[in-house]
Image (cartoon, grey):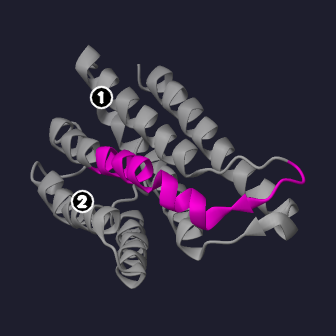
C-alpha cells in the first residue's frame, strides 16, 4: 500500500511543482514585462521548500503496516492543500502582456496565506495522527516537530494581517528559516 499511496502523492506534488516552476520560467522569459515583487518571489520559494519537505516526509510512511482510509485521506488532503499553495502563488504570464507581481501579491495575499495556513494546520494534524507509525522515532517525536511547525502558524498569520511591508518581509524570511530547519531536522536519511 505504501508504494501505491506514495505514487499518488508524488504525482500531486509533481503537479504542484509544475505550476510553480512553469510560472517562474515564464516570469524569467517575459522579464521585460514584469514588475517584480521580491516579497512574492519569497513566498514562491517558501512554497517550493515546503513541497520538497513534504515530499521527503513520504519516505518514513513506509513503516506503516496497516493503512486505513483515514491515513490515506489525510495524506491526500495534505498533498491537495500543498498543490493549492503552489498554484495560488503561481502567476499566469500571457506572452507580451505586462505582469504586476506587486499587485498580484496584494490581491492574492488572503488566498495564498489561507492555503499556507491550512497546510501547516494539516501538517500538525498529520504529525499527530501518524505519531505511532514513524520508523525509528519515539512516540513523542511528533511533539518536537509540531513545536517547530507551530511558529509557522504565527508567521503566516502575521504576514497575512500585517500592514507594514517590513513586517511581511520579516515573516517571509522567518518562514524560509523555519522551512529550512524542518528540512534539516526531519528529513529521513535511511
Per the image, the residue denoted by label 2 is: 153
Q: Nearer the viewer, residue 155 or 100?
A: 100
Q: From what the image shows, is residue 188 above or below residue 39?
A: above
The CA span between labels 1 and 2 is 19 Å
Q: Dividing the picture into quarters, in which one does residue 75 lie? A: top left
The region drawn magenta spans 95-120
Q: From what the image shows, is residue 34 above or below residue 95?
A: below
Q: From what the image shows, is residue 58 above or below residue 35?
A: above
Q: Let me know if residue 68 appears in the view.
A: no
Q: Residue furthest top?
A: 69
Per the image, the residue denoted by label 1 is: 74
Q: Let me know if residue 176 appears in the view.
A: yes
Q: Earlier in the sequence, mark 1 or mark 2?
A: 1
Q: Which residue is depicted at the point 43% across and 71% down?
A: 176
For label 2, the crowd category at 10 Å Cα-Cα, with few meaning under 14, some 14 to 19 and many 20 or more, is some
Q: Nearer the viewer, residue 34 or 65?
A: 34
User: Tag 1's secondary structure?
Assistant: helix
Amino acid at each position: 500500500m505504501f508504494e501505491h499511496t506514495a505514487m499518488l502523492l508524488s504525482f500531486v506534488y509533481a503537479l504542484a511543482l509544475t505550476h510553480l516552476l512553469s510560472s517562474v520560467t515564464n516570469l524569467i522569459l517575459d522579464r521585460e514585462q514584469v514588475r517584480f515583487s521580491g516579497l512574492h518571489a519569497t513566498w514562491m520559494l517558501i512554497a517550493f521548500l515546503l513541497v520538497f519537505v513534504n515530499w521527503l516526509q513520504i519516505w518514513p510512511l513506509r513503516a506503516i503496516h496497516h493503512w486505513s482510509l483515514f491515513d490515506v485521506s489525510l495524506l491526500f488532503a495534505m498533498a491537495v492543500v500543498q498543490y493549492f499553495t503552489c498554484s495560488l502563488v503561481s502567476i499566469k504570464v500571457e506572452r507580451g502582456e505586462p505582469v504586476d507581481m506587486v499587485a498580484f501579491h496584494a490581491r492574492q495575499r488572503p488566498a495564498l496565506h489561507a492555503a499556507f495556513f491550512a497546510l501547516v494546520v494539516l501538517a500538525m494534524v498529520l504529525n499527530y495522527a501518524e505519531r505511532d507509525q514513524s520508523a525509528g522515532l519515539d512516540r513523542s517525536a511528533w511533539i518536537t516537530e509540531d513545536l517547530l511547525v507551530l511558529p509557522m502558524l504565527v508567521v503566516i498569520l502575521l504576514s497575512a494581517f500585517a500592514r507594514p511591508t517590513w513586517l511581511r518581509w520579516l515573516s517571509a524570511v522567518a518562514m524560509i528559516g523555519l522551512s529550512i530547519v524542518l528540512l534539516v531536522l526531519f528529513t529521513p536519511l535511511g
